[in-house]
């Protein structure tokens, strides 16, 4: 049987088993990892959302506090008092002692004229009427500006409140210390990748981002993406790391406080878990693969062995069935042919008898007749040999049990053929196992088999060659091999070798019964006969006989 | 050979006739029949030295049955079994029933003659012994000559 069938089967079983066993494992691993990641991400998102909300509150409180102070001042002090430079400076000093974060204070009249100023810059006399924030505060009563450059050419923002005093309107303006404010916002930064900053509706940085831009720079975040609630958005970064942002609105929805967090960094624990999972699953896969390959190989090998065994048995069974059927047929045919042969033979004999008469003796064709009759008798004899062989082949005789030494039988058979072999210049090499037990077997039948095989070997070689005869004890069976270095049996004939009447010898030289008779003899003895043959290298026939110890007589 | 009486029983008429002819040409007293029944009839009428009997004959009585009957009628006649079939068991059964030998068809005529002569030898030997025994008996008891002879 073709070995590639088993290789294919092996591959197929391994493949299917691996797919069936590994696929669920890998899917399970992936699902667990995905779920785990989801939970982890949700946790982080919750965290930064919470942080955004808390920080927004802190910033709102900060602004509210300062706005309230300014409003209180405006409500409790008169314009006249406030526009006095000294009073304002005193007031600024007092406030600065209580709260931090204010850089300066200034009083501006309704025409936008800066009337008094307390702070480090020289801003007196400037007119703010054209500044956008000025009209807003005049309008609304209090106003916190976006960050802008202003006269002092550095980013800052202001809180301004409107005061009314005897139908006069004025404005108290305070600048917020950017450092203090930035620091406040930045308290929400965590870890190595955490970011906290404020942008306005147009996405302009109001406080510096840790990584991406300074105040008044344009951020790459679209503030409109954040809804009214505290929202999370995610941004994919170039190196594949995901950065999540949570934003919360403050200052009447003008500013958006954004908390950023890189997922990767916060997932340190997750990574460990993932690596662990990968290691466990990989080991599992490895074990499954090795086990699958090994068990499949063992299974397929067993199968192959069993199959080969069955095939051998089947071949033997088929051979004996064939022989039995052919035996019956041969008997029938032999009988049918023997009767007419007998008649032909007798008729020819009768003619020979008649030729002895005197009147035939004078016939000029006497010699022709005699020769013809001789020929008829010769060929009847030839046919007789065939039919008698056939009958011998079909014969079902109880084997006669002798005490047999297989080596002796071989030697005797060899002796019979020695001359024949010598004439053909064939060397015979013997390698006989010296300690065979005496077995109970049929000596003459065994000899018939050996003679047959030796004869075949000599015929196969033709001239000049070697026959090697070897006997050995194989698995408590007596094994005999007869090897010739003849031309070998062509593969197309190998299946038919034991078939009755199959012969490659010239017509009249072989009946094609020798090997099939040998086969049935050995089979009846409970042994096996097999051969291996390679073209142009020769043929080896091997006989195995069970050791049947003779009964004590 | 004029005293050598042979009966050949074979269903193949061509074979039967040729053998009979060849034997007659050699001065045997040869008769031929084609079935067991005819053979038994004939054996009841005349005695034979050697009977050549085909074991396997289609229809009617087969060779072994015929042999059994013939042995009852003429126990001294030597029977040579003939077969186209290697029914060794049948042949052995035949030998057990007292057949002289068996031959496988097609036979060589010379071989058949040899077997026949051997059989005849045995028959003659038997006859002589029986004759001698009878003579001895008669010498002892001459009155026995009036006993019914079978």
Image: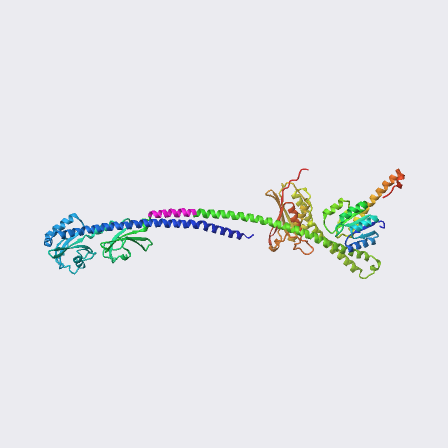
**Front-most of B85 and A437?**
B85
Query: In the image, residue A177 lies at what x, y percent?
Result: 19, 52
Task: State the image coordinates of residue B102 (x, y, percent, origin top left).
Answer: 76, 48
- Residue A349 in the image: above or below residue A525: below
Note whether residue A6 is visible. Answer: yes
- Quadrant occupied by the C terminus of chain A: top right
| Residue A425 appears in view | no
Left or right side of A345 for A277: left
Question: What is the tally of numbered marks visible in this picture?
Answer: 0
Query: Relative to residue A1, is residue A148 drawn left or right?
Result: left
B94 displayed left or right of A24? right
Residue extending farthest front:
A167
**Residue nearer the viewer, B130 or A255:** A255
Colour scheme used in the picture? Answer: rainbow
Is residue A279 covered in magenta? yes
**Prevailing SS of the magenta stretch:** helix
What are the residue bounds of the magenta stretch? A268-284
Residue A542 part of the magenta segment? no
Q: Position of residue A398 (x, y in %)?
A: 69, 45
Residue A162 placement: quadrant = bottom left
Left or right: B21 as drawn, with respect to A222? right
Q: Quadrant of residue A213?
A: bottom left
Q: Residue furthest bottom?
A: A364
Q: Percent x, y for residue A360?
A: 82, 59
Q: Residue at x 51, y 52 (%)?
A: A8
Instruction: Identify which residue, B98 or A129, lies in the foreground.
Output: A129
């Amino acid at each position: 049987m073709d070995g590639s069938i088993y290789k294919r089967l092996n591959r197929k079983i391994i493949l299917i088993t691996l797919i069936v066993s590994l696929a669920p494992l890998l899917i399970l691993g992936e699902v667990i990892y995905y779920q785990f990641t989801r939970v982890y991400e949700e946790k982080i998102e919750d965290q930064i959302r919470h942080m955004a909300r808390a920080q927004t509150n802190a910033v709102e409180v900060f602004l509210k506090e300062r706005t309230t102070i300014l409003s209180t001042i405006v409500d409790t002090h008169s314009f006249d008092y406030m526009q006095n430079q000294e009073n304002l400076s005193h007031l600024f000093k007092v406030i600065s002692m209580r709260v931090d974060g204010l850089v300066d204070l200034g009083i501006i009249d309704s025409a936008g004229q800066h009337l008094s100023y307390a702070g480090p810059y020289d801003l007196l006399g400037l007119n703010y009427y054209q500044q956008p924030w000025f009209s807003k505060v005049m309008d609304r009563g209090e106003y916190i500006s976006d960050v802008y450059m202003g006269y002092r050419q550095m980013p800052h923002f202001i809180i301004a409140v409107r005061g009314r005093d005897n139908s006069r309107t004025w404005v108290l303006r305070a600048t917020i210390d950017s450092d203090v404010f930035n620091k406040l916002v930045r308290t929400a930064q965590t870890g190595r990748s955490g970011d906290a900053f404020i942008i306005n509706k147009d996405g302009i940085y109001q406080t510096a981002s840790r990584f991406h831009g300074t105040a008044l720079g344009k951020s790459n975040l679209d503030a409109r993406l954040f809804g009214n609630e505290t929202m999370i958005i995610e941004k994919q970064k170039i190196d594949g790391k995901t950065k999540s942002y949570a934003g919360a609105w403050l200052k009447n929805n003008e500013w958006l406080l954004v908390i950023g967090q890189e997922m990767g960094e916060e997932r340190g624990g997750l990574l460990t878990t993932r690596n662990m999972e990968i290691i466990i699953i990989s080991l599992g896969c490895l074990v499954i693969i090795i086990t699958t390959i090994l068990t499949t190989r063992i299974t397929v090998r067993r199968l192959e062995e069993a199959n080969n065994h069955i095939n051998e048995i089947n071949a033997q069974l088929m051979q004996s069935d064939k022989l039995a059927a052919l035996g019956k047929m041969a008997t029938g045919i032999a009988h049918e042919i023997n009767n007419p042969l007998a008649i032909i033979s007798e008729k020819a004999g009768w003619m020979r008898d008649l030729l002895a008469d005197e009147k035939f003796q004078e016939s000029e064709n006497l010699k022709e007749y005699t020769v013809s009759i001789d020929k008829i008798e010769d060929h009847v004899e030839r046919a007789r040999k065939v039919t008698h062989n056939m009958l011998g082949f079909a014969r079902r005789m109880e084997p006669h049990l002798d005490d047999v030494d297989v080596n002796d039988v071989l030697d005797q058979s060899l002796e019979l053929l020695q001359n024949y072999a010598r004439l053909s210049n064939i060397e015979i090499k013997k390698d006989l196992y010296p300690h065979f037990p005496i077995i109970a077997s049929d000596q003459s039948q065994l000899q018939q088999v050996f003679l047959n095989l030796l004869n075949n070997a000599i015929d196969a070689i033709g001239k000049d060659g070697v026959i090697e005869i070897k006997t050995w004890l194989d698995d408590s069976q007596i094994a005999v091999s007869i090897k010739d270095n003849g031309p070998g049996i062509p593969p197309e004939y190998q299946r038919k070798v034991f078939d009755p009447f199959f012969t490659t010898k010239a017509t009249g030289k072989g009946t094609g019964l020798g090997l099939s008779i040998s086969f049935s003899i050995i089979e009846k003895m409970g042994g096996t006969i097999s051969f291996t043959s390679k073209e142009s290298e020769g043929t080896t026939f091997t006989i195995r006989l069970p050791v049947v110890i003779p009964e004590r007589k | 050979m004029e005293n050598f009486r042979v009966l050949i029983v074979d269903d193949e008429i061509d074979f039967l006739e040729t053998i009979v002819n060849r034997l007659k040409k050699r001065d045997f007293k040869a008769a031929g029949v084609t079935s067991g029944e005819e053979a038994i009839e004939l054996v009841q009428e005349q005695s034979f030295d050697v009977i050549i009997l085909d074991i396997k004959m289609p229809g009617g009585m087969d060779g072994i049955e015929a042999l059994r009957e013939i042995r009852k009628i003429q126990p001294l006649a030597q029977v040579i079994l003939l077969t186209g079939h290697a029914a060794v068991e049948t042949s052995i059964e035949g030998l057990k029933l007292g057949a002289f030998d068996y031959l496988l068809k097609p036979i060589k005529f010379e071989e058949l003659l040899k077997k026949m002569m051997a059989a005849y030898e045995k028959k003659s030997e038997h006859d002589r012994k029986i004759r001698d025994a009878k003579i001895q008996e008669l010498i002892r008891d001459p009155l026995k000559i009036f006993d019914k002879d079978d």
